[in-house]
Amino acid sequence: MMTRMEREEIQKIVEQAIQDGKNTLYEGKVASYIPELAKANSSNLGVCIETKEGEIYASGDYSIPFTVQSISKTFSLILALQTAGYEKVFSKIGMEPTGDRFDSILQLELKDWKPFNPMINAGAIVTASCIDLPKGFEEFLRLVRRLCGNDQIWLNENVYRSEKKTGTRNRSIAYLLKSDGVLEGEPEEVLDLYFRMCSIMVTAKDLAHYAMILSNRGEDPVTGEQLVDRDIVRIVKTLMLLCGMYDQSGEYAVKVGLPSKSGVGGGIVAVAPGGMGIGTFGPMLNQKGNSVGGEQILRTLSEKLNLHLFA
Ligand code: GLN
């Protein structure tokens, strides 16, 4: 469907999507539980699409950097699977969606002490503990830079310090998991890696490139290099579809129908079919912690470009 459209027509749809997104911003609020994030500009909104043929469609604030936050959970899962392997990672973390908030502690005592999936905080903290490398954060940053095609991606020290200082809920999760032997290693060290991974700065354009690589089964279409194994890409995309928007994943899958991951910095990364990647940015969030503007943009794009996986 997409390929038959003219470039101009697609760009018009992208502009329309931004307009639709703007109309929803009043429904959201910027995240404030991490004090540094409260400084976000509530009117920011941007989108970028990248295809494996190298076409780029973009509008709005697609090149403004923001912290990746929970979108880091997809990169850290890739790194954990690459280094610790499938058996180890999924002996400690499940693959099931939850109906609970992203930072919930509720289920941890109810089911085997094992976090439900790697896309919620508890799961991502255990994922971080599986990245058993001497320079874990440097390796993580290297991977993100490669997959986003941008070697300028950097750590925002202010956000990192702000979250480290105030992250009592994540600390509770880590110590609880430690007390039951699910979390290996020193909780403070694991949390430090987790907070750093959440605090790197990306743009909607970076996310579009990353999603394009995931859509292209992990292969860089320009160099032909396999950046991530196909099996790992399959696992990550499946978990994004089932759990990437937390306790809104079901509704989002019905309405948008693309494997996606959000972060409280305002980003959403969405993997469209056929080698197409989409990144959005809008820091106004709904109550589930997902970008309201980004979600609307993706709804418009999914409908107008006929991208829904099950349509
Ligand atoms: N760093 C954030 C946290 O741990 C990530 C949460 C999110 O983006 N939903 O609370």
Image: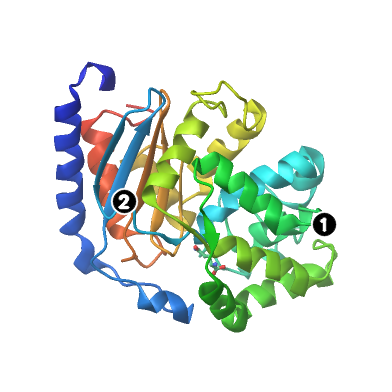
Residue 212 vs residue 127: left or right?
Answer: left
User: Closer to the camera, 128 or 257?
Assistant: 128
Kindly identify the amino acid type of the residue bearing the numbered disc 1: Pro
Q: What is the quadrant of the N terminus in the image? A: top left
- Relative image position of residue 133 (x, y in whole percent): 80, 53
The answer to which quarter of the image holds residue 238 is top right
Q: What is the quadrant of the C terminus in the image? A: top left
Q: Which residue is mark 1?
A: 134
Q: Residue at x 76, y 46 (%)?
A: 89
Which residue ends up furthest to the top in the rendered image?
4
Kindly identify the amino acid type of the residue bearing the numbered disc 2: Tyr
The answer to which quarter of the image holds residue 13 is top left
- Local secondary structure at mark 1: loop
The correct choice, above or below, for 84 with respect to 309 in the image is: below
Q: Which residue is mark 2?
A: 62
User: Closer to the camera, 71 or 140?
Assistant: 140
- Relative image position of residue 159 (x, y in whole percent): 51, 73
* Residue 169 at least partly seen: yes
- Local secondary structure at mark 2: loop
The correct choice, above or below, for 124 with respect to 303 in the image is: below
The answer to which quarter of the image holds residue 6 is top left
Q: Residue at x 51, y 61 (%)?
A: 69
Q: Residue at x 63, y 73 (%)?
A: 170
- Relative image position of residue 7 (x, y in whole percent): 20, 26
> Residue 297: which numbered mark, if any?
none
C-alpha gap between disc 2 and disc 1: 34 Å
Sequence-first disc among 2 and 1: 2
Residue 116 vs residue 198: left or right?
Answer: right
Residue 184 vs residue 229: left or right?
Answer: right
Contact between labelled residues 1 and 2, with CB atoms less than 8 Å apart:
no
